[in-house]
Image (tube, rainbow, N blue to C red):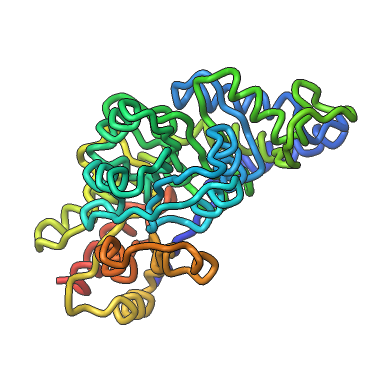
Amino acid sequence: MKEIKPFYLDLTQEEIRALQDEFGNILNSGQLILGKHTEEFESSFAKYVGCNHAVALNSATSALEVLCMLKDVCGKKVAVPSNTNFASVMAILKAGGQPIFMEMTKEYFAPSVDILKETFKEHKVEGVMWVHIGGIITPDFIEVSEFCNSHDLFLIEDAAHAHGSWIDGMSAGNIGHGGAFSFFPTKVMTTMEGGMITTNSKEEADLVKSYRNQGKRHAAFGGLHYDQGNSWRLSEIAAYMGIIQLAKLDDMVGRRQSAVTIISKALNQYGINFCDTSHMDKCSHYKFIIPVPSGKNVNTIKENLSARGIFCGGGVYEVPCHLQPVFEDISYNPASLTTTEEYCPRHICPPITSGTTTEDAERMAVELVDQLK
């Protein structure tokens, strides 16, 4: 029986040979960072997202921290969902901000515009970090953007899961006031390690390029430092891998969507709920989120699926940030995070990748219905 796993490196043998050949060329050139491949990757990514500028960094964690620096979060309250990766909250803290945890809805595992409005009213936040969890852009995200604009709140998009996610003709990372994408190995597209900031501000793009390179402003090399940056550069070989992956991003997202369509149809037939993305133009489907029905045990379901060769990947996220030991000093109102605490440990994400075949999806559909109905 074929095992269906949550990780798939989408590179053909031809693409691997191209990477190997170009790695040799990069080594022979002597320019391992901040070269032509980084520039091409950035310009191609900006064109894909539809923004004016994209700047590559060594991780999305770095990208989020730099965005917080650009928005001058030091000493400010920043709304952020508790249901997110460690990096979202840590970036705010590293930049000197105060995270204010937001609740999520069970429909999309993300906040809503109403939750944001309540958070703003209660805490007087000065900015927002919104997470497109699993690649889902919530139906009211345009309203979120409008609310932020009308109340002079900066809006950072944590789009680490959302490569290829679009709504109302707009890409994730180009709706708010700056986006951060991840190219970690498990993501929809990868550069092994890496991140990208998207922005429509040339001034901000120039600052990002300085911050990632020890504050050297427009000089790629040299000994003069103007800004308090860091060593957050992406390597040339990683950038070249990004170019290869970006060229096939729509195809990779399309294969994920095909698998989700098959599984969704089966779940709908039995009235099994899942996080629906039919309101979107396209969804990356980095994670297909299925809340486990009341009375069912998540671990038992995962064990039963594993016994049938279907290995669920990590959830989004089993332990929310307000319950993480590292953030125990951040105060929060338990009554405002009840949905988060109920559903974070009570969902599964079947192993959908760009390598998922029609046969894989059909098999998963049958087994999921058997476990969840």
Q: Nearer the viewer, residue 166 or 83?
A: 83
* Residue at horizontal 44 percent and vertical 64 percent from the top: 5
Q: Nearer the viewer, residue 173 or 46?
A: 173
* Residue at horizontal 31 percent and vertical 26 percent from the top: 150
Q: Quadrant of residue 220?
A: top right
- The answer to whether residue 285 is above or below residue 47 is below
**Residue 272 horizontal side relative to residue 79, left or right:** left
**Residue 9 horizontal side relative to residue 344, left or right:** right
* Residue at horizontal 63 percent and vertical 38 percent from the top: 241
**Image quadrant containing the N terminus:** bottom left
Q: Nearer the viewer, residue 53 or 8?
A: 53
Q: Quadrant of residue 230?
A: top right
The answer to whether any part of residue 266 appears in the image is yes
* Residue at horizontal 57 percent and vertical 42 percent from the top: 74
- The answer to whether residue 102 is above or below residue 295 is above
**Residue 312 horizontal side relative to residue 260, left or right:** right
From the top left corner, tell me how far across and down residue 195 is, in percent: 59, 41
The answer to whether any part of residue 313 appears in the image is no
- The answer to whether residue 336 is above or below residue 156 is below
**Residue 282 horizontal side relative to residue 190, left or right:** left
From the top left corner, tell me how far across and down residue 349 is, in percent: 34, 62
